[in-house]
Each structure stands twice: as structure tokens, then as C-alpha cells.
Amino acid sequence: MTNALTNDADILDEQELEALEQHYKEREQEHEKERHNVKARLSGHTFLKRCHLPMYWLARLREMHVGDTFIMASLRHHYDEMDFEGVAEIYAQKESKGVYKLHSNWTLLSKPSRPHRFSELTFKIEKGGIIAFTGKHSPENQHSFVLTSRYIQWLLKHVTAEDNQPYFDLGLPPFLSGVNVDKNSRTTRRFYPKGKHNEKGIHYLFHDEQMPKSMMECIVDYGIASGAINFS
């Protein structure tokens, strides 16, 4: 009798496992379908212009390989009183089958009227430089990305020469604007440090903490610093 019950339980477990696997496969298939389902189209140059970004970056996006991260800007500020690092970052990632993801994170404590802002967009680049937004696209997300990009471009125009100098010394564009990093966190282009006469240039290797942050990482960082998240 005991063996029969045990066998029935094993069959039930197997059936539950198969049902879960089937459910997971269906969700993955739906997600994959959604990644390619076009919700809106816009000229790539028009979109970049709205974001106040260089229009030639459309060509840079086309050059990306799967696993690359194209950093459009990465500004960070440490608030000593909270032991918190605020960020203002926009970047793109190249996924499989021609799909890209755009991310924007804003957690700088600039002013109360400018709250933390996050957005994530998926898109494909079609013929003629058309950006086809896919997945769970919404005009609100697109608008959020555009606003964050504009805020960042305004900040970049008002930084001091002293702020830019560390990047110039390394031969990098200020705040990594336009730096492409491969799946191994290595710059895909060579850079030429100031004062070092290396004709070949060098590829920089980024540490994990130097790469753009994910939305979840930004939320958790602020939650811990503000006391909203407490693990004790």
C-alpha cells in the first residue's frame, strides 16, 4: 500500500514538472514573439534628434554585435550623507535576432520635482534607418527615455573642464559617451591615452561596477540607502 502511494506521488510530481515545463516553454515562446511584434516605427535620426544625441550613433548601433553594450552616457555622484551613488545613465544592448534594448536610469537627487525615472525599450533597426519599437512598448516609456537623455545632455554641457579631464587623460570621451563594450566588458575600439605614444592604442577592460547599472540594481541601492529596504 505504501509503495502504491509513493508511486502515485512520483507520477504526480512528474506530471506537475511536465506542466511547469510546458508553461515555461509557452511563456518563452510568447515572450520571443512579443520581442518581434512591432508596436511603433520612427526614423532613427528623428529619435536620436529628440534625445539630443548624435545622429551618427545610428550607424554605431548597427555595428554592434550580440552581447555588446553601447554606453550613451554614464554620470554618477556619491552622496556621502546617505552613502548612496546616484546615477544618470542611458545605454543600449544588442540581443539575439537583431533585437536591441534601450535603458535609462535616473537616480540623481537633483530636486523633488524630478523623481527617479527608469525606462526600457526594445527595438529593431529596419531598412532605411527606421527604428521599429517592439515588445511591451508604450509612448510613456519612450517619452521617459527621451526626457532622461535630454537631462543628461544638459548636464554634460555644464560640467567643468576638471570633470572631463580624467576621461581625456585616458583618451576616452567624457562620461563614456559613445563607448561600445563587448560581452567580455572590453572596449571594441582602441583608445589613445594622453601622453602615451602607443600607435596601436589600447582596449580598456571594464570592471562590473564600471558598467551601466540595471534598473533593479538602482532601485535596491536607493532602497538600502534610504532605509526602505532593511535586511536585518
Image (cartoon, helix red, strand yellow):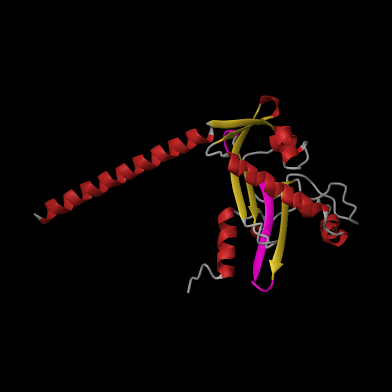
In this orientation, does residue 189 appear?
yes
Examine the image and state in which quarter residue 133 appears: top right
Residue for point 62% across, 57% down:
116
Where residue 80 sits in the image (x, y, percent)? 69, 72
As drawn, is 175 to the left or to the right of 230?
right
Image: 122 above or below 9: above
**Position of residue 81 in the picture relative to residue 226 (left or right):** right
Query: Which is nearer the eye, 225 or 195?
Result: 225
* 65 over 114 or under it: above or below: above
Q: Position of residue 66 (x, y in %)?
A: 62, 40
| Image height of 151 relative to 131, above or below | below
> Of 18 and 75, which appears nearest the observer?
75
Query: Residue most toward the left?
Result: 1
The x, y position of residue 151, in whole percent, is 73, 51
11 in magenta: no
- Residue displayed at 41% across by 40% down: 27
Task: Specify start and end residues of the magenta stretch as a single range.
Answer: 80-98
Q: Nearer the viewer, residue 32 or 37?
A: 37
Q: How many marks?
A: 0
Query: Would residue 134 be found to the left or right of residue 52 on screen?
Result: left
